[in-house]
Image (cartoon, helix red, strand yellow):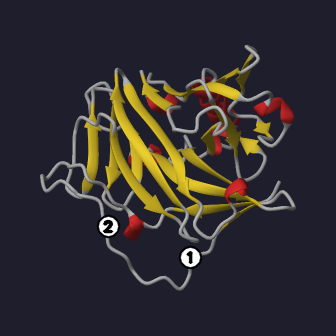
Amino acid sequence: MTVAVAALSGLSPVSAELPMFNEKDWLGYFIGVETNDFKFGVGADGKTTLKINRKKGDPINNKLTVVVDFQIEETKPDGKITIYKLLPETLESSQKPTNKPEKTVFRGKVKGDAAFEVTVDETRGGIALGGRLLDPGTLAKDSLRFTISVKIPNAYADVDKPEDKKKMKAFEDRIKEDRVQLAYADKKRSKLSTSESIDTGSKEINGAGITAAEVEFSTYQGKKLGVLASPNSMLSLSAKQPGPLQDGFAISWTADTATDPQGAARLNIEVK
């Protein structure tokens, strides 16, 4: 299946519309949550990130920042998918900036005036995200779905892969406990290697639909990233091309609008 990103060329520079903090630590953010394990923020421009913290509480490495995208996908008659990114200038919320999100809602649009809303809640040990399509705009409603993409970056972007056999052995020992574990809707489970090439487009990977994923890299310094779909929603893995998962991949969430028309389903992100 081919995925294309909708072009936004020709648009003039925009300014953020969401209310924002003026305090130094969260300047420019609409939502900011920090615990011993992670730092999560929704910028006034809609840019959303999660950083895993060291045991001392500061982020382990900015290059390991997880990016969360709110978007709308359109499935074309030929099966191709176009991804529409949110337009920052369309974002709005009637709520104030907060460090303790509880049913905190903001709305926005993508190209074609398709409108969506996002709900954010702080949970014990993590963040719960939800969302739904509000208006298809000029796009065909039946071909659209609201999705949340959790992008896991290259786990070893700062590490030069050694060519020397002795040093390679040391690197292999370092990553031997790395893993991505998946749970499926049919109750099956799988443990994926992160160093071997994997085709995320294969049926074996996404199977009957993923309900939970747990990601563990040595660079996370003992922390694990968990992504879970509540009932009436599902996850899927994707990457730009076949390759090792340690080079980066995405976990996408979407709700079943037939069984969840009000957008009650949630994507739960945990760090432990």
Q: Residue at x 55, y 45 (%)?
A: 148
Name the image quarter holding residue 17. Answer: bottom left
Q: Point out the residue furthest to the left here.
A: 23
Q: Residue at x 49, y 44 (%)?
A: 131
Q: Image height check: is 132 above or below 7?
A: above
Foreground pick, 99 / 115: 115
Foreground pick, 76 / 216: 76
Image quarter where the C terminus lies is: top left
Residue 239 % position (x, y): 70, 47
Q: Image height check: is 28 above or below 50?
A: below
Q: Image height check: is 93 above or below 113?
A: above
Q: CA distance from mark 2 to mark 1?
A: 17 Å
Q: Secondary structure at mark 2?
A: loop
Name the image quarter holding residue 50. Answer: top left
Residue 75 % position (x, y): 75, 57
**Where does label 2 land, which residue?**
16
Name the image quarter holding residue 215. Answer: top right
Residue 112 visible in this rendered orientation of the protein: yes
Q: Image height check: is 198 above or below 209?
A: below
Report the number of discs.
Answer: 2
Residue 57 % position (x, y): 26, 30
Q: Secondary structure at mark 1?
A: loop
**Nearest to N terminus: mark 2 or mark 1:** 1
**Where does label 1 land, which residue?**
8
